[in-house]
Image (cartoon, coloured by chain):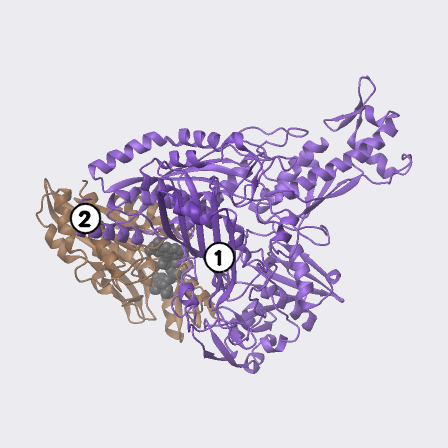
Chain colours: A brown, B purple
Amino acid sequence: MIPAQFDYVRPGDVAEAVRVLAESEEPKVMAGGQSLTPLLRFRLAYPDVVVDLGGLTELRGVADEGEWLRIGAMTTHDEVIHDPLVAAHCPLLAQATHTVADPAVRHRGTLGGSLAHADPAGDLPAVALALDAEFLVSGEDGDRAVPASEFFQDYLTTVLDIGDVLTAVRFPKLTGWSFHYKKFSQTAQAWAIVGVAAAVRRDDGSVAEARVGLTNMGSTPIRARQVEEACRGVPARTDALREAAQSADAGTDPPNDLSAQADYRRHLARVLTGRALAAAAGL
Amino acid sequence: MTMAPESGTDQVGSPRLRKEDARLITGQTEWTDNIQQTGMLHVAFLRSPHAHARITSVDTSAAMQQPGVVAAYSGADFADEQGSLPCAWPVTEDMLLPAHPPMAVDEVRYVGEAVACVVARDAYSAADALEALDVEFEPLPAVIDMESALAEDTPLVHEGSGQGQGSNKAFEWPMAVGDVDSAFEGADIVLTRRYHQQRLIPAAMEPRSVVCRPDGDAFTLWSATQVPHIVRLMLAMTTGIPEHKIRVIAPDVGGGFGSKLQVTAEEVLALLLARRLRKPVKWTETRTEGFQTTHHGRDQIQDVSIAADSDGRIRGLKVDLLADMGAYMMLVTPGVPILGAFMFPGIYKMDAYSFHCTGVFTTKMPTDAYRGAGRPEATYAIERIVTELADEIGMDPMELRRRNWITHDEFPYTGIAGLTYDSGNYEAATDRAVELFDYDGLRAEQRRRRESGDPVQLGIGISTYTEMCGLAPSRVLGQLSYGAGGWENAAVRMLPTGKVEVVTGTSPHGQGHVTSWSQIVADQLGVPFEDVEVLHGDTRVAPKGMDTYGSRSLVVGGTAVVQACDRVLDKARRLAAHMMEANEDDLEFSDGRFTVRGTERPSTSLQEVALAAFAAHDLPEGAEASLDADATFDPENFSYPHGTHLCAVEVDTETGQVSLRSYTAVDDVGTVINPSIVDGQVHGGLAQGIAQALFEEAVYDTDGNLVTSTMADYTVPTAADLPDFTLDRTTTPATTNPLGAKGVGEAGTIASTPAVVGAVVDALRPFGVRDMRMPCTPQRVWRAVAEAREAGRSEGGQR
Ligand SMILES: Cc1cc2nc3c(=O)[nH]c(=O)nc-3n(C[C@H](O)[C@H](O)[C@H](O)COP(=O)(O)OP(=O)(O)OC[C@H]3O[C@@H](n4cnc5c(N)ncnc54)[C@H](O)[C@@H]3O)c2cc1C
């Protein structure tokens, strides 16, 4: 890699990170570097300072906070996949994280980095959105919590300011729910053409509630609210869920690119949402 | 795993672990980019952002002011000495061969063409200073699509150079055998298809890299190349620097697949920069730079017609080819489709065959050899259309093949394209493959899925391929206007301590020659496998060679090794007879020892003979104080591996996703030296052929930008995308070399693409799908199903 020149700082705590960010012209936070490094390599980013969060052990790990699971922003994908608390209370996140890239990337890439990067083709933003996660942010003006519905603003754009550090993400423990993440990609270890994060709460033979987050169907992750509405109270049967999934592409604005045109993505969203819901419902 | 014997004879055929691997997997390698030289400078190239443009100005002055910059040059600064990059294969006398300056001087003709360069003290400064180079272009029209390139009034790729002669047509190459017209007129069925061979990017693991160091009036050039000997020769011819003043080294080279069978702009410029600056220089491509500027493969449009009787007997074949040369002729650019000309008939007998190829210039990266080079394209066309013919007739596609292929008792057989296939047993390979694959069982499952309207359909694809390799008889290459021969050289030296040095002219870059050659020599000389060292890839160490490509190394280079061993043994026998006071004719040699036939006299080892030769105290009259020999082998014919590949895919008709369910490959590559190396070659070959079928395509937009310029867009599959392959072999030794080997480097790639696409089409046949453009991406498959359903509906919905 031959990036343009930059200074490098490795702060010892979050406060120092926030201070360095505030003092710099055009800083860039670095977590696992798996998305930032390509930007530097292609000279698409010219930061004057790279602030490496790698030394902040306080941002690493999973904690049980009663109603919530708190996952430090610097927790790697691999740690998320193998964490017993995540397995017990947030299996959808573990399942989706398992589809991210390859083992090498998963050992470096972080949950916080994936969400802060906000690539709509990334697998984890749709999961955070579907699960109504909460983002904990430290900045010059102190700490704040941002709901997932407000976090993702646009393509590669979040509410994070240039001086903000995402410190952790809180996921609600959803008891009585079951989940499935369906990723559709051209090769096994690739970005999603379309992905669907589905959560279903069953009430015996019918679906009481469902939540659906879509990957790569617009400039941000998208909640398929119409599908969620349509699922309410339907029989827990494949055909009924498939039918409910027919509106999965409503309100989306999927991209046209090499791997898929928008019409194909819309079709995939409908088919995959039906399948994800059915799988989540244990069908 | 079978345990390999520790030493001595019977090495050939044993799955020895590769001698190369301990070093490779522990990082003790010398890639070109790892090479450091005192005072070494780093080169970065400014590359054209336009597919076609006039260069109106190049201003290097600001770049020169950047920290660390030593020099900056435009193409014009080298116009007098850089010459034109070589094309060694002018396929016709009137072929257009436009000048190809290593750094563009007046005009650029593809995105990525080098326009200017910066030389700096380190790679970072060089890359930074590139941004300060000021180049102005006047855009010219891009020429992207081959058919429109040939239309009237199309802008010319080479107008500016005055060499276009009013057309983008580079050459026409026709060939016809037999009475084609009457074969087609008299046939019950004529089937015509158009197949697209998409453009591919070879994507070797190691990027290209070159280092050049001036040594007095001579130069040492390290390059990530498959062809150090060709590079040396061509650098001398291109730059005028005397050949004996250039030493080319291919250190550890991490894959090539043909993409490093080239003489590149960067190699020439590294040499010229080292000469001008009197300092060592290094250049290493980035991955995107490599995708844009390391030659591409395939890119042909094939119009194919086959004529047959209603009982399935093939009468004739017509092939009309458009082959995209890209912007320039590189080392063997025009020769690639011509190699294919001989392979379209495949393993089938027929009465008549015609082939016509038009080479076309476009404003894209030149194409050139890529694993299989001409043969995958041909094999694809024939294997696909034969399957379609079977469908048209209503015959099982395997049965149709059996009715037409050359039978075992007919070998040697001279096919319609003029090649004499020395040996083969298509029946044996096919029977074994059918059995391993459970052909009948899968056909039954396919019927069930079709009948039940399963959204996941099953398809079976067949490829009963052959190919020509062991490039090549020099005489044939001469007839085809190739600029050099196809021989190979080897030297074998017994050292005084009894160890053996083997020098080979092949240039391995992942194939494991060090191991295989050691096995051959161990058996020939009866010495331990561990006692053999194989030297290669340096024109000073291995001065004679034609390098590695075209599945030639074992067949041609391995044979040279055998011959050199024979000569060493001839010398040794004479000396041993002298030492043992016996008659040469009474000596027997086995397990590395000479014995006197029919006596109990003590034997003499080859090692003892080697020491005696070195000491030279008592040599027979006229013998020299050495035990070594070299040999050059020039094959009399190509070799013809063949085999039967069967592929089963599941196609999700709702999403278009294709999953490889199983893949069986039964190959006949003749004698196998090291079965695990052969398996490795087949695995890698299959992966690359499957990649063409399902995953990879180099896409240019209408402006001539390479859209697939990163690994994220150009989807190279990984092991996770491939099934467990079921591999087996039949062995019908080649009769044209003493090893009986046929070559295996390209077979998997050549065979697999039609098997996979054939399987996808087979799965979708009930919907009315008859062809799929490669790669069969989910989107393409989904659209094909949707369109076929639509067409079926408008036809009255009978399907
Ligand atoms: C080959 C490859 C394949 C991939 N495939 C997939 C895939 O299939 N699915 C998928 O979802 N992802 C994929 N990724 C991306 C991967 O998930 C990355 O881990 C992720 O995008 C970024 O995480 P990171 O920790 O590496 O962040 P970095 O690259 O370090 O940072 C990414 C961005 O987020 C910002 N940032 C990071 N952390 C913070 C923080 N704590 N506070 C504020 N800003 C922050 C950085 O400034 C930067 O702009 C792939 C990556 C690679 C290299």
Secondary structure at badge 2 equals helix
* Residue at mark 2: C-beta within 8 A of ligand 1: no
Q: Say which chain tag 2 marks.
A: A
- Three-letter amino acid code at disc 2? Gly
Residue at (19, 40) in percent of width and height: A282
Q: Residues within 10 Å of mark 1 (few under 14, many from 20)?
A: many
Asked whether, in this view, residue B793 is left or right of residue B681, the answer is left
Please name the residue that numbered disc 1 is placed on: B357
- Three-letter amino acid code at disc 1? Cys
Q: Residue B32 in the image: x percent, y percent?
A: 61, 57
Rendered position, B160 above or below A215? below
Please name the residue that numbered disc 2 is placed on: A274
- The mark total stands at 2
Q: Quadrant of residue A36?
A: bottom left
Q: Residue B212 in the image: x percent, y percent?
A: 66, 63
Secondary structure at badge 1 equals strand
Distance Cα–Cα, label 1 vs label 2: 50 Å
Asked whether, in this view, residue A18 is left or right of residue B254, the answer is left
Q: Ligand 1 sits in which quadrant? A: bottom left
Q: Residues within 10 Å of mark 2 (few under 14, many from 20)?
A: many
* Residue at mark 1: C-beta within 8 A of ligand 1: no
Residue at (19, 47) in percent of width and height: A277
Q: Residue furthest left?
A: A233
Q: Quadrant of residue B261?
A: bottom right
Q: Residue A251 in the image: x percent, y percent?
A: 17, 62
